[in-house]
Amino acid sequence: MKNLYLFILCLFPLTAMAQQPAAAQAADNRIGLTAQHVPQQTPFAAAFDTRFEISHTPGYVVELDKESLPEGFELTAEKQEKLSPGTVAYDLTFIPFTLGVSTFTAVTFNLKKQAGAQPLASALSEQVQIDVKPVKYFDEQTLRDIRPPYIPSSLLIWLLCLLVLGLIIYFGRRFWLDTRAKRLSVQEEKLDNRPADEIALSKIEALLQSGLWERAQYKMFYIELGDILREYFWRRFRQDVSSDTSAELLRRARRIPQLKNLLLPLREYLNSSDLVKFAKVIPAQQTMRQDVGTVQKLVKETSPRPEQAQEEAR
């Protein structure tokens, strides 16, 4: 029994020595919140400042745990100020994105041996109820509406319809006037009771005397010559070729018996005319005379004989 007491007395100093470092280590991991300033009211989306003062064991580092920041409040600025070897202050700026009374939850500050190390202890701030109010930038009593007048979409549709209707009426009337003018001009031409061949040959002679060729207006010369030929087709054969291309006119000519022996020179004339009008080819004097002679020959050889003219007149 005496030996047992002696054994216990020997172990007691060893146990006390083991407990002493643990107590010292716990004393080294000291951290606590000593002061906190958080406003209880702030405008919506307007930055506000908070301040947290933390006491800790000197020689250790205090870091903000950003995972603990309250929801609905965005941290925009962070500043740490060392007040003393064992006291540090955090100035944090937040912007609220909630309306009404919102809970600014506790923020965690960790004590660490060095930056980036595992936390040894933590301190929590107190929760605060913050009343976030809507922002009012003007006096409603003096507010004036500067927006343009509101125009209903249905009214815009009606205005657009009226505009389209006006354009249709304008272009329709213009088309009618142009058509009427052309019709009157055709009627005036039809008042010429001379035979078709006589009218065509007289117009060819007037074209040769017009001076277009002498003034090097070759394109206009061939346009006038083509119009004379097309008018002759109408007066003589009742074929409206006024808007036909050269190929279409030649196809019509193949169906007219009187032109059976004139198709080859007619095609040569049409090719020569197209080169001058569309390819801007300058024709030679001999080419011009040959083309004029082709039109004159066509008119003369297809003009009715006196007895045939009398029958057609009946």
Image (cartoon, rainbow, N blue to C red):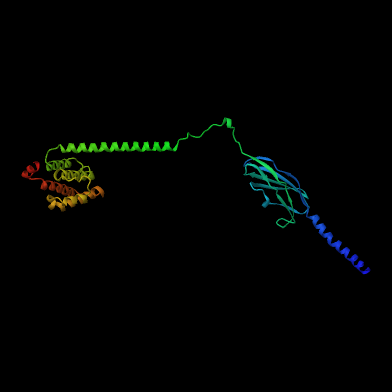
Residue 184 screen position, x and y as percent: 20, 36
Measured as percent of width and height from the top left, residue 262 is found at: 14, 51
Front one among 209 and 116: 116
Q: Could one spot residue 282 in this view of the protein?
A: no
Q: Position of residue 137 (x, y in %)?
A: 60, 36
Q: Is 172 placed left or right of 66 in the picture?
A: left
Q: Position of residue 208 (x, y in %)?
A: 17, 42
- Outermost residue, front direction? 1
Q: Does 7 sit left or right of 201 as displayed?
A: right
Which of the 4 quarters of the picture holds residue 5?
A: bottom right
User: Which residue is at the front of the view, 170 or 98?
Assistant: 98
**Up-down relation of residue 55 to residue 173 (above or below):** below
Quadrant holding the N terminus = bottom right
Q: Residue at x 31, y 38 (%)?
A: 171
- Nearest the eye: 112 or 268: 112
Which residue is rendered at x = 14% and y = 41% of the image? 199
